[in-house]
Image (spheres, rainbow, N blue to C red):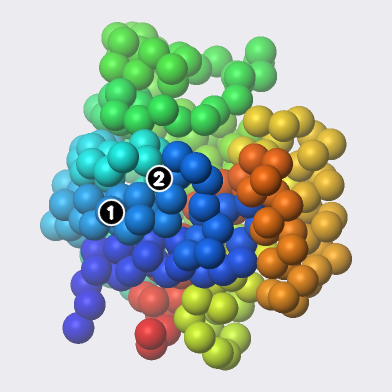
Amino acid sequence: MRTPADNAQLALLLEVSGTPKPGNVDRRHEYEDLRFEHFLAGAVGAGAGLRAAEAGATVGAAFEESVEGMRHQRGGNTQFGCLVNLVPLVRAAAVGPLSPPAVRDVCAGTTVADACDFYRAFEYVDVAVGDPPPDVDLPDVGLASDATAAIREQGLTLWDVMERSAAVDANAREWVEGFPRAFAAAEGILDDDGPATDRVARAFLRLLAEEPDTLVRAQHGEGVAHEVQERVAEVGDDLDAAAALAEEYVERGVNPGTTADLTAAAAFVALERGWEV
């Protein structure tokens, strides 16, 4: 029987194996310096941190450990955002039935030390983040561990960091709202049929059709983010039609990475709710 940590690693593997996911690395689409194999190695490397979350480690410490393990491959940042989502989900699943209120309680219970651990994780890999809006009062994540003194001085918990980031980052919004999109997408996976990797790809397409991807917005602007959303919505669940978009967006370097993070979370929730793979 798989444990929550096992299911989290499997969710990482299923997410990157699902194809096509327009603009993302999958088993048929790669970037020159970021390949399918790097994600496989990242999923294996993250295992120790995920098992720490399952065993009762704090969210911040388990997250930092999972990112440190993930980095031991040559592609750099493969699954940082996925782990932002998976670590609290694993912690919640380890202590009782997994539900939106349960995971929200885990997130709301995070501390200043968790926020410091989260910032330290940015030391390990280059993470693509946009400039925060001027009204978001947070230390720059680019400072990584150098920001911990300011975090302690301001008394910022990891919940505070996510709550203040929620307006610009979909993963942060999931954190403070109890992962509603991930849980809904998990139901779509469970109601679907066919190979697991096809179900994951369709879940990705549905999530991306719902909302503009916040990583695309940060890297390419509002117009491109809405273009991607609208074109994926036109494709619907048609994986053959999505394949052409996948080729185009990889060529353009348009990577809806936040949607991939939510897809991994959805796969985990589905696995925890009995999805047989």
The disc placed on residue 176 is none
Q: Residue at x 22, y 77 (%)?
A: 2
Q: Is residue 50 visible?
A: no
Q: Tell me the quarter of the image containing the N terminus.
A: bottom left
Q: Position of residue 37 (x, y in %)?
A: 35, 56
Quadrant for residue 137, please give it: top right
Q: Position of residue 260 (x, y in %)?
A: 54, 55
What's under tag 1, amino acid-wise? Answer: Ala
Residue 173 horizontal side relative to residue 73, left or right: right
Residue 178 horizontal side relative to residue 97, left or right: right
Q: Nearer the viewer, residue 120 or 256?
A: 256
What's under tag 2, amino acid-wise? Answer: Thr
Q: Position of residue 141 (x, y in %)?
A: 44, 20
Q: Residue at x 43, y 17 (%)?
A: 142
Residue denoted by label 2: 78
Residue denoted by label 1: 41
